[in-house]
């Protein structure tokens, strides 16, 4: 029996990883959109465009385009590593108030259950690296 956990009719296979951090939203957002933060979650060598439709490419060959950017809240973009034959959609979103902020990575349009699990591990690692980088600031 094949499990379809993580598969929806609307966005296919998807994964979400979140963590509540002991920082205000502006501190987390400012890190995520900085050169150092972008290298952690999007990939090294990339500049994060702020305009809808703007394209990006990382040093390791991941490409995509911005679908939406709301300062301090979320960025949604297509994401296609160089060894994939399809695009996926990634959303990075913050929520919360005061001294705690929840960071969420959500990825849609994955190729299947195996890719979903690979991406779960990827976003969990990214989250750990964001946490470590913020702690060093």
Image: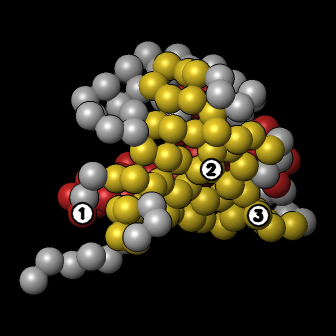
Q: Earlier in the sequence, mark 3 or mark 1?
A: 3
Q: What is the CA distance from the residue labelled 3 to the residue labelled 1?
A: 28 Å
Kindly identify the residue that appears in the image at 76 percent across and 64 percent down. Answer: 95
Q: Residue at x 38, y 20 (%)?
A: 61
Can see residue 124? no
**Residue 41 in view of the camera:** yes
Residue behind mark 2: 92
Ranked by sequence position, the earlier of labels 2 and 1 is 2
- Residues 24 and 132: in front is 24
- The spot of residue 34 in percent (x, y) is 71, 29
Numbered mark located on residue 95 in the image: 3
Q: Which mark is residue 113?
A: 1
Q: How many marks?
A: 3
**Mark 3 neighbour class, 10 Å CA radius: few under 14, some 14 to 19, many 20 or more:** some
Left/right placement of residue 49 relative to residue 104 reads right
Q: Quadrant of the N terminus?
A: bottom left
In what element is the residue under mark 1?
Answer: helix
Q: Nearer the viewer, residue 44 or 92?
A: 92
Residue 8 spot, x, y in % from top left: 40, 71
Q: Which quadrant is home to the C terminus?
A: top right
For numbered disc 3, what is the local secondary structure? strand
**Mark 3 or 1: the one toward you:** 1
């Amino acid at each position: 029996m094949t499990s379809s956990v993580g598969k929806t009719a609307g966005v296919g296979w998807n994964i979400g990883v979140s963590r509540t951090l002991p920082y205000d939203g502006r501190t987390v957002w400012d890190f995520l959109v900085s050169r150092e933060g972008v290298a952690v979650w999007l990939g090294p060598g990339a500049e994060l465009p702020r305009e809808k439709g703007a394209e990006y490419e990382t040093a390791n060959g991941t490409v995509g385009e911005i679908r939406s950017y709301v300062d301090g809240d979320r960025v949604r973009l297509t994401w296609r590593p160089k060894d994939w034959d399809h695009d996926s959609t990634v959303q990075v979103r913050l929520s919360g108030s005061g001294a705690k902020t929840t960071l969420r990575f959500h990825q849609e349009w994955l190729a299947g259950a195996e890719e979903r699990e690979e991406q779960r591990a990827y976003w969990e690692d990214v989250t750990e690296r964001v946490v470590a980088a913020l702690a060093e600031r």
